[in-house]
Amino acid sequence: MIDKRSTFREAVKLVPSGGKLALGGMTNYRRPITFVRALINHYQETGEPKDLTLVNFTAGLESDLLVGAGMVSRVRTCYFGLEIFGLAPMFTYYANRGEIEVIEETEASLALGLRATLAGIGFMPARAWIGTDLPQLRPDVRTITDPYTEEKLMAFPAIKPDVAVIHAIKADREGNAIIGNNKGVDEELTLAADKVILTTEEIVPQLERADLITQFIDTVVQAKNGALPTSCHPLYQIDGEALLEYVEQVSDPISFAAYLPGFLKF
């Protein structure tokens, strides 16, 4: 099998400007924070990647940092925040001013869009959004008629990230990985994305089982404590003090610029 181990310096180059970037994990759990740190460092050195579209089932600290760094133009997620720790300050700042495009999504539209990609088709029909005002906000989501029942359905377009970044508990050199029981939509992102970057707490010679398999992984980077300050059960829990420090210190571009240098230190 191919040894897919790499470095952050090499992995960040897989994220293209103008691309759709999906970040794995869920809310404040198992987010690829160390990768985001490396990506922002790369952006500050080279100006790339920029004009990103974040495609996250839920977006949290990892995404707010990219927004604050000026790398994100649009967001597709059904939730953007820090749960009990408060709002995501930089997303809130730019969204309230209309300086970042927010594409309306729900759990259903994201899941169905990914499912369409996995099925190899351009859209996935469903009853979701029927009878709501959401279609007015998303004219690209069209209606179709079921040819068998003549029922009106929504046709959710396929969602295909250019790159997905998943943080794992443990992986081998080929990219087989264990991500734990709280998978979010990481399995679906791995199958749907053009390229998949795997960061992992530990690289071992061999796994007895795997949640993600090597055929869909492009590169593997070791990142001990790579999800902090979000949690990575059962290895470590949320660093609540660090998250509170972020929301207390950051509220606008000036305060974010003051916070960022400390975050970027490896």
Image (cartoon, helix red, strand yellow):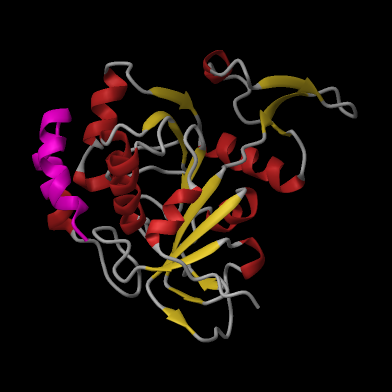
- The quarter in which the C terminus is drawn is bottom left
Q: Position of residue 84 (x, y in %)?
A: 23, 47
| Identity of the residue furthest to the front in this view | 46
Specify the principal SS of the magenta part: helix
In the displayed structure, does residue 29 sit left or right of residue 76?
Answer: left
**Does residue 4 lie above or below 251 as drawn?**
below
| Span colored in magenta | 245-266
Q: Nearer the viewer, residue 160 or 138?
A: 160
Q: Position of residue 170 (x, y in %)?
A: 45, 75
- Residue shown at the point (52%, 63%) measured from the top left: 219
- The quarter in which the N terminus is drawn is bottom right
The question of residue 111 being in magenta is answered with no
Q: Position of residue 3 (x, y in %)?
A: 57, 75
Q: Position of residue 6 (x, y in %)?
A: 46, 67
- Residue shown at the point (27%, 36%) measured from the top left: 69
- Residue shown at the point (32%, 61%) measured from the top left: 227
